[in-house]
Image (spheres, rainbow, N blue to C red):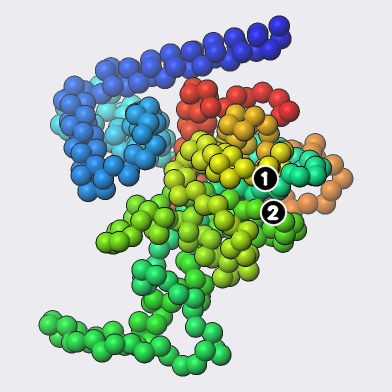
Amino acid sequence: MVLLLTDVFLLLTQVLLWIVVGLVTWFVLLKALPRAFLGLLVLLLILSLLAVSFFSGPSVFDDSDIFRTLWYLISLIFRPLSLGVILLLILLTGTKVNKVVGRVINTALVLLLACCLPIVSYFMAQELEWEGIRMIQPAAAQVTGDSRVIVLLGRDTTRPFLGPRTTCPPLRPTQGGMPATPATPRPPDGEQPMSAEAFRVLTQAPTQLPIQLTDKADRLFYAAELYRQNPNSQIVISAPRRLDRKTKDGETKEMVSEAKDIQTFLNQSLNVPCEAMRFLDHDGVSIRRSAENVKKILDDNKINYGNQLTVINTAMSTERTYRTFREVFGFYPVARPTDFYTLPARSKLDNLAPERDLVEPQLQATDFLPSIDALTLGSQAIEEFSSSIYYFLRGWIKFRDLG
């Protein structure tokens, strides 16, 4: 009976949220925006979608989910930078909005300034990361016959760099001198051809790593550390193929997948054997898609994972990841957040870890000054809030007890 009432409450909450989203969208599109500007905005959106589809192909919408694409377009008006630009563009259209000019300017400035302040964006990220910390639970005791599986959600942890299509490991000092470089004809504009040293530096990854990393690559090192703690684990890497890298003739999506680059980095730089990374998901374009693909891979290969499933993702997305995998797999995984941007507030640490001498955040004067880093962090936090609401509306996550 209690479970039935809970499901009814969740359903009513979803319906009410859909109504709120519809009313806000209706007000912004039909009441707040001038008709001339609205028509121009719709035209630009249609042209942008056509251009993206033409130049990038159908792989841009690999999810085949019109609702996800539609939600992305609707959510643009809720994002600080997008909404601020829209409000300012209203003034540039030449429409007579004299009565509301002051309100539009004030709203745009307050919105942009608030989200550019580190103290605001830091607080939003801190709240998301704190929820990720709350998701951390000890791993269940391993049952005989169960295999530990580490799911690494590696999207945006690496980036492509200039190099041959088939990247070889960098030369070791014991391998001898410089690789032979074919003679390069002089360019017609008179520029000097690239020297052998310049070619070597550019085509052998920066810092002598086989793959170039981003600022979100802590997940890779953490996955390797978890594997070293239990060498019998199997790592499943989920990441999308690279849309920002042109596919050459004869290449498949697996060859230009970020999951393949992550596997290369873990093997060549962190000494994780390829046998422990046999399963790659090359279509991990979203958390939901990753969860579904990973489950299919494990089931198709008859991997008896039991309840031994560890999921690694960014701290801000940990709660959504945790609850998404719960809905797909039917049990709560072991959440392991990484890529923290903030430190938890002392008041929260006192409740969760009393009498522990832990590092605390320190308020600075610069926290009240706008910065582009704060805008980036705040936008990521708002996007995560928006994505969580979307997942809830779709029924992909449920906010209930931690099990």
Of residue 245 and residue 98, the one placed in the foreground of this image is 245
Secondary structure state at the residue bearing disc 2: loop
Q: Judge from the rendering whether residue 354 lies leftward or rightward of residue 71; answer left or right.
A: right
Of residue 110 and residue 279, the one placed in the foreground of this image is 279
Residue receiving disc 1: 310
Residues marked 2 and 1 touching at CB (< 8 Å): yes
* Disc 2 packing (10 Å; few <14; some 14–19; many ≥20): some
Please report the residue visible at 29 percent of the width from the left and 42 percent of the height from the top.
58
Camera-near label (2 vs 1) is 2
Q: Judge from the rendering whether residue 333 lies leftward or rightward of residue 356; answer left or right.
A: left
Quadrant placement of the N terminus: top right
Secondary structure state at the residue bearing disc 1: strand
Please report the residue visible at 58 percent of the width from the left and 15 percent of the height from the top.
10
Q: Residue lying farthest left?
A: 188
| Residue 325 horizontal/vertical position (percent) | 60, 35
Give the mark, 2 or 1, whose residue is nearer the N terminus.
2
In the rendered structure, which amino acid carries the disc numbered 1?
Thr
Quadrant placement of the C terminus: top right
Relative to 27, does residue 347 appear above or below in the rendering?
below
Residue receiving disc 2: 233
Q: Is residue 125 visible?
A: no
Measured Cα–Cα span from mark 2 to mark 1: 10 Å
| Residue 39 horizontal/vertical position (percent) | 17, 26
